[in-house]
Image (cartoon, grey):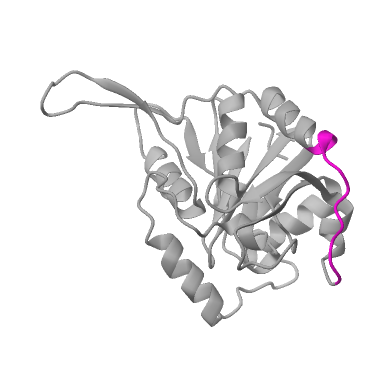
Amino acid sequence: MFVWTETHGSGHSFITVHKNNQVSLYSYGRYGTPGPLTLTGDGIMLYMAGEDAGKYINDNLYILNARVFKVTDADIDKVKMYFDNLWDSGSIPEFPEGVDKLFRRNGRSIDVYDVTGNNCTTHIVKGLKQSGTKIFEDTYTPIRTQYPVEREEAFTVPVSLQNYLDRKKHNLKKSDIIEMTEEFMKKYPNNENLIPPEKGIKAQIFELITFSARIGGEVTSIDGGEMGGGVLGSSYDQ
């Protein structure tokens, strides 16, 4: 199972599950329902496989410079069941004019999106926890007591999640996070010569606000799922 994060503008995060040479991609956001400046809207779950998943992966790798992290201790059947159930329980949304056919084919309205507490990153974290992974469990020792205290990390913005996974991959004592970005770029070459776009004023503002959030999941009013994954509206088993 792989966690994808990108930080263009407000950023975005999503998950892919790889089993028996099949890719299942799950991405949550609003995808044009409604505009990006309101705080709530239809919560749209995308489920993609085959060519649609491949296109989404390529766009994220080369347009948005996404990074990919493998979670080694996750039960991929549990996480797939979790996201499949969410998608199956949803309804076909009424997309506005101009929404990409990729989203129309693969999107289901599953809940109410809330930029401050029910967004792309919070859904990814919930799915990861359903998988049984221990990557969010941590301990620290307060100076006053000197007794270890267990805690669980929480995240609401893609940049915080990416920074946390980036730190975790350097933990030599426990290899539960492995960065796989280069391996995926070999698997999905940039045959269309995709390049990142120039950042507009809106993307720069969102990026500034998002990066100002502290590492560790402090709530902020901007999240990548709000715009459906930045610009996009945004065979490895396990």
Q: Is residue 199 among what the camera can see?
A: no
| Count of residue discs | 0
Give x and y (percent) for residue 65: 57, 63
Tell me where the magenta segment starts and ends, as one range: 87-97
- Residue 95 within the magenta-colored segment of the rendering: yes
Residue 122 falls in image quadrant:
top right
Q: Is residue 195 among what the camera can see?
A: yes
Of residues 117 and 82, which is closer to you in this image? Answer: 117
In percent of the image, x 56 and y 28: which residue is there? 129
Give x and y (percent) for residue 49: 82, 45
Quadrant for the C terminus in the image: top right
Q: Main secondary structure of the magenta part?
A: loop
Residue 18 falls in image quadrant:
top right
Of residues 198 and 100, which is closer to you in this image? Answer: 100
Give x and y (percent) for residue 102: 84, 59
40 vs 233: above or below:
above
